[in-house]
Amino acid sequence: MDRLTALQVFVTIVEQGSLSRAADNLDMSRAKVTRYLTELESWMDMRLLHRTTRSLSLTAPGEQTLEVAYQLLELTDSLDQIRNQNTLELKGQLRITASFSLIDSLLMDVVGRFVSHWPQTAIDILTTDDSVNLVDARIDLAIRITNDLEPNVVARRIGECHSIVCAAPEYLQRRGRPTDVQSLVHHNCLSFAYFGRSAWVFDGPNGPESVPISGNISANISEVLLSATLRGHGISLQPSGAVKSLIASGQLIELLPEWKPKTLGVYVVYANRKQVTPLQRKFIDFLAEEIKCSPYW
């Protein structure tokens, strides 16, 4: 029996809550997963899981085994990391997810440079503004811009996202230009479902200010708000990386530069801290360095 594989199967069964989901996650047949678990229990000479048709739970020896399994797998991962650090070619595929605006303004360039540097790697990108279950969707890494991560999520903060208040010249000609942040209450402010739906927070000349905002367009996808802003429908809060070229070309006008919108964190989210692969770790480090060197993040 391959005991490391058996321990990996055991850990995955516990994390997934069922043998069937573990089989899907590991890309194995359910029969093979069952065999690994049976052989592990036979080798340990004890039952590790209480199993019924509806649920499973750890026995007392199973809890002890799980703790040791995590330690052994972490050591194995460390050995793999040492091996890969001394190997010229990084290999494998990553599946990552992020919003379209983040992909368009940052990730595509980063991904392009990454796969050029390590030509035996491949990256599959899933575009979504929603949070997805990484295990169910078989996603390796999720890149999120937020200050409100879900409880107990495993994540690493790799940078900051700075935002800009902006509007199209057409809107400003029609409605006038706000003179300070409090005057935004008199404007049509386009809101993002996941951030600042009813108030925008600024760091201004006199300290922090929270401004109640309202408008007749809101969306859960930032690109929709950007499109509405470009069409002159209102004022919006946009990531600086997404609008820098539009401001430079005059399609959008930056407003209230003396007041800095609240900074958001850029996070890489992954399913399990103990099972980060060398390829995942290398990409995370690469992305963090790219953000650090970018004037827009």
Image (cartoon, helix red, strand yellow):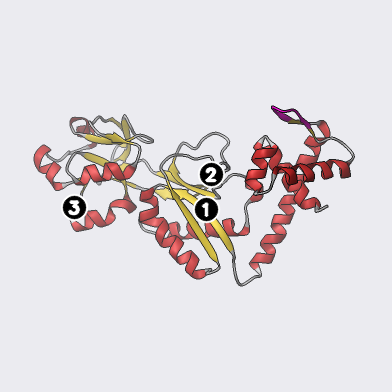
Looking at the image, residue 295 lies above or below residue 6: below
**Can you tell which of label 3 and label 1 is closer to the viewer?**
1
* Horizontal relation, residue 204 to residue 143: left or right: left
Instruction: Identify residue for label 3.
Output: 251
The quarter of the displayed image where residue 135 is located: top right
Q: Write the residue at 53% across / 44% down.
A: 137
* Horizontal relation, residue 81 to residue 100: left or right: right
Q: Is residue 256 visible in the rendered structure shown here?
A: no
Q: Is residue 55 magenta?
A: yes
Q: Is residue 52 magenta?
A: yes
Label 3, label 2: how many angstroms apart (C-alpha)?
38 Å
Q: Write the residue at 22% across / 58% down.
A: 248
Instruction: Identify residue for label 2.
Output: 137
Type of amino acid at the residue the image marks with label 3? Gln
Type of amino acid at the residue the image marks with label 2? Ala
The numbered mark, 2 or 1, whose residue comes first in the sequence reads 1
For disc 1, the neighbor class at 10 Å (few under 14, some 14 to 19, many from 20) is: some
Type of amino acid at the residue the image marks with label 1? Arg
Q: Which residues are magenta?
A: 50-56
